[in-house]
Image: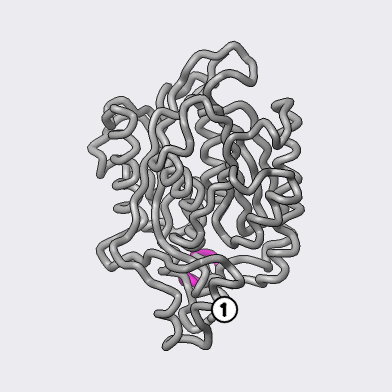
Amino acid sequence: MIRSVVRGTGAALPRRIMKNADFEGMVETSDEWIAQRTGIRQRHIAADDETTASLGEAAARAALADAGLTPDDIDLIVLATSTPNNTFPATAVEIQNRLGMHHGFAFDMQAVCSGFVYAVTTADLYIRGGLAKRVLVIGSETFSRILDWNDRSTCVLFGDGAGALVMEAGEGAGTIADRGVLAASLRSDGAHKDKLFVDGGPSTTGTVGHLRMEGREVFKHAVGMITDVIEATFSAAGISADDLDWFVPHQANKRIIDASAKKLGIAEQKVVVTVDLHGNTSAASVPLALSVAVADGRVKKGDLVLLEAMGGGFTWGAVLVRW
C-alpha cells in the first residue's frame, strides 16, 4: 500500500528574540509569573520585513535541502496558517512563487493551532489518492501581528516562526512497521468558538482584529480533548503509549503538555518540549518542535512519533508517523 513518508524537515525563526523580562515595562507581569504558568522563557517576533510567506519560504527551503530535493520535485504545497499575508490569494501560492515553482498546486489550511496536524493528514490523503507524489507541508505564523500588546493574558504567550516537512509517496506492507503516516484522528466543535478567537475579519468588522482568549476555559477543555484524539489514534493503529518513541505536542503551555502526557501514560523523557524557546507559534509549533528534535538527533529513522495539537474553534487532532 502507499504510505506518506517524511523525507525532510526544516524551520525558520525571526531574528528578534523577546524574553519574558522584556514585557515587564509593557504590562503588569514578570519573568517568574510567565515561566511558572506557561513554561515560556522567550519567543521570536517578526520584523517588518519578515512575514508568514517569507518565514514559510525559508522553512520550506530548509526542508527541501534536508530531503535532497528541489522545488521542481514538489507537486503540492499545503500551508497551515491563521495569519496569511493577504485575505486572498492563499499565502501558499506566494510561497510557491517565491520558490520558483510554477507547476503543481498550493493552498492554505486554516485550523488555527491544529492546522499543521490537519495539513499533514490532508497531504497524506492527496498522496494516497494519487494526486501528488511529493508534498511540502508548512506551518507558518506571525501571531505578533494579531496580538493586543496591552493584554497581559495573551501577549506573553505567542511568538512567530515556521516549520516544514517534505512528504513523499512510499510503499508499505500495511503494518505498523511501515514508514510514514500510520493513523490519524481529527475533531472540531464550533460551540467553543468564543473561548479562543480573533475579534475581526473581512466579513464582520472589515478589520484584522486581535486575539481573544478565555485561558482557564481553554485549559479546562484541552487535556480531555487531546487525550480523546490520541486514544482514538492509538486504537486505529493498534498500539499503546508504551510503543511510542516520541510525543511531539502543540507547544502552547507546559502545564497542558505535562498533564496530557501524564494522563496518557507517556513517559516524560519521550516528550519533545520547545515552548520555552518559541512560545505558542500556533500552526508552526509542531513542525518547529519536530525540527529541533530531528536536528539534535532525538528523532531517528524508524522511530514512532505522535503529533498532536489543539486550537481555536475548537479544533484538535493527532497523527501517528513512523519516521
Task: Please give the name of the residue rendered at 26% of the width and 40% of the height, measured from the top-left corner.
Answer: 99
Q: Residues within 10 Å of mark 1 (few under 14, many from 20)?
A: few
Give above or below for 111 relative to 19: above
Task: Please give the name of the residue rendered at 73% of the width and 44% of the height, measured from the top-left corner.
Answer: 265
Residue range corresponding to the magenta coloring: 202-209
Task: Please give the name of the residue rendered at 36% of the width and 47% of the height, measured from the top-left corner.
Answer: 11
Q: What residue did someone put label 1 on?
A: 33
Tell me which colouring the rendered structure shows: one colour
Main secondary structure of the magenta stretch? loop
Percent x, y of residue 12? 34, 51
Give above or below for 257 relative to 195: above
Mark 1 belongs to which amino acid?
Trp
Say if residue 107 shows up in the picture. Answer: no
Percent x, y of residue 282? 51, 57
Q: Tell me if residue 169 is in the magenta stretch.
A: no
Say if residue 231 shows up in the picture. Answer: yes
